[in-house]
């Protein structure tokens, strides 16, 4: 079958981008022809990927999105029929992979009332309605129960079109017998002693991931504990924002920023604690990657996969609404008990006994199922 994949931008290390890439590869492996339409592509293009960078320009992001959807719609009409899979909310999709949470829910709960009179709200609410509205036929793949409830609350007629996906943790995150060797190699590489405590945060988009919250929690630690901290931040974003906060809080010397990595297992093995106090996270793959690798997790309730941390007892979850003092206190407790707590072993067992790995295969199954009835 011919499949058309629509994604606004591709860059290495993004969670949405990673899922898109893995699903597209599986579709190719099953013999389907795929075309990819995007506004920008960073990094190497995998073999057999037919990537079309849409040739449009606009002064604003919303303008680009409108011109993109118009161009793609007209272009696809001129070609042989294909099944259209989108990784961003937009008109004209047969199937949508919900990498994000409900826009209307965020607009009502996290924004002032005047926001609903802006052009930005008008655009994104209209595009979301083109997928989830009662009069739409787009099938939708969702990642978490939290995310699903948000869509059902604001678009009650979409329930029959929502299809659950299991998590999609990479199998190489299960370190088990390799953990100690990787830990020693990592700490030697970054010149970290065994007495140091390594806090790790992984994720592109430093503001939404709550890096400011992490830095504030580190700054609040007792001086003798803070002196042992090494905070390693891995992700794609401009570092200026983070560096400014770190300087203001007096923790610049504890911070190392790594602009993305293809060897996340080494970071998971070398660290002592994953901290991920995101403001909003529809899923949060890194929470489960840490859990199955045996790395304890400290996160926030707003992350879709936070319930796995509670269920596995592989770390602690801050309640909602967020309170910085709670994060500060939980960080201090976890660091004090990092060697005596059962978080690490609980996570390894949870990863061994539960299906946390088949998202991409299940998504490909759904693509084939719905494409057969549409083409």
Image: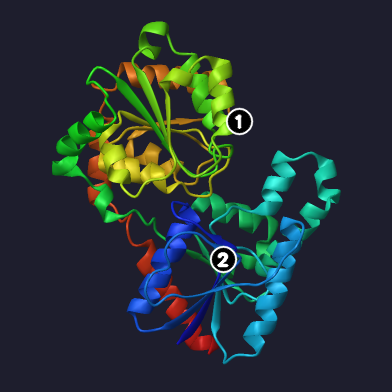
User: Mark 2 = which residue?
Assistant: 7
Q: Is residue 182 visible?
A: yes
Position of 21 relative to 198 (above/below): below
The image's mark for residue 321 is 1
Q: Which is more toward the observer, 206 or 297?
A: 206
Tell me the quarter of the picture where residue 53 sits.
Answer: bottom right
Position of 119 relative to 310 (above/below): below
The image's mark for residue 33 is none
Q: Is residue 206 left or right of residue 257?
A: right
Dot 1 falls on a residue whose secondary structure is: loop
Residue 343 lies, in percent from the top left, at 29, 31
Q: Which is more toward the observer, 170 or 307?
A: 170
- State the residue at coordinates (57%, 92%): 80
- State the residue at coordinates (71%, 63%): 64
Q: Tell me if label 2 and label 1 are in contact, CB under 8 Å.
A: no
What separation in Å lies between label 2 and label 1 (alpha carbons)? Answer: 32 Å
Residue 249 lies, in percent from the top left, at 55, 16
Q: Is residue 326 visible?
A: no
Crowd around label 1: few <14 · some 14–19 · many ≥20 (10 Å)? few
Position of 211 relative to 372 (above/below): above
Could you tell which of marks 2 and 1 lies nearer the N-terminus? 2
Position of 341 relative to 288 (above/below): above
Residue 102 lies, in percent from the top left, at 64, 54
Which image quarter is the N terminus in? bottom left
Q: Is residue 28 left or right of residue 37?
A: left
Tell me the quarter of the picture where residue 266 sits.
Answer: top left
- State the residue at coordinates (78%, 53%): 120
Residue 225 lies, in percent from the top left, at 36, 12
Q: Which is more toward the observer, 340 or 226?
A: 226
Crowd around label 2: few <14 · some 14–19 · many ≥20 (10 Å)? many
Marks 2, 1: nearer the viewer: 2
């Amino acid at each position: 079958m011919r499949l058309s994949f629509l994604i606004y931008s591709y860059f290495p290390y993004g969670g949405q981008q990673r899922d898109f890439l893995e699903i597209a590869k599986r579709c190719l492996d099953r013999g389907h022809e795929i075309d990819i339409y995007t506004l920008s592509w960073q990094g190497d293009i995998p073999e057999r990927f037919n990537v079309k960078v849409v040739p449009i320009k606009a002064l604003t992001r919303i303008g680009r999105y409108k011109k993109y959807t118009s161009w793609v719609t007209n272009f696809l009409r001129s070609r042989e029929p294909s099944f259209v899979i989108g990784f961003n909310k937009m008109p004209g999709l047969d199937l949508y992979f919900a990498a994000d949470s409900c826009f209307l829910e965020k607009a009502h709960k996290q924004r002032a009332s005047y926001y609903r009179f802006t052009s930005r709200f008008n655009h994104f609410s209209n595009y979301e309605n083109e997928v989830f509205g009662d009069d739409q036929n787009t099938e939708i793949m969702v990642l978490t129960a939290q995310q699903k409830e948000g869509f059902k609350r604001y678009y009650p007629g979409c329930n029959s079109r929502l299809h659950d996906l299991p998590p999609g943790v990479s199998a190489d995150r299960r370190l088990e017998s390799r953990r100690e060797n990787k830990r020693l190699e990592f700490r030697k590489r970054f010149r970290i002693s065994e007495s140091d405590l390594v806090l790790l945060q992984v994720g592109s988009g430093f503001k939404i991931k709550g890096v400011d919250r992490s830095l504030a929690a580190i700054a609040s630690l007792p001086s003798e504990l803070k002196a042992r901290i090494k905070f390693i931040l891995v992700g794609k974003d401009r570092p200026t924002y983070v560096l400014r906060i770190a300087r203001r809080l007096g923790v610049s010397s504890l911070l190392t920023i790594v602009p993305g990595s293809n060897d996340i297992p080494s970071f998971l093995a070398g660290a002592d604690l994953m901290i991920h106090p995101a403001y909003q996270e529809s899923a949060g793959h890194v929470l489960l990657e840490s859990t199955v690798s045996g790395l304890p997790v400290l996160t926030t309730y707003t992350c879709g996969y936070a319930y796995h941390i509670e269920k596995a007892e592989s770390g602690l979850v801050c309640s909602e609404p967020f309170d910085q003092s709670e994060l500060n206190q939980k960080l201090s407790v976890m660091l004090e008990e990092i060697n005596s707590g059962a978080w690490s072993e609980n996570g390894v067992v949870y990863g061994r006994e539960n299906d946390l790995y088949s998202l991409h295969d299940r998504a490909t199954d759904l693509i084939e199922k719905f494409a057969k009835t549409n083409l």
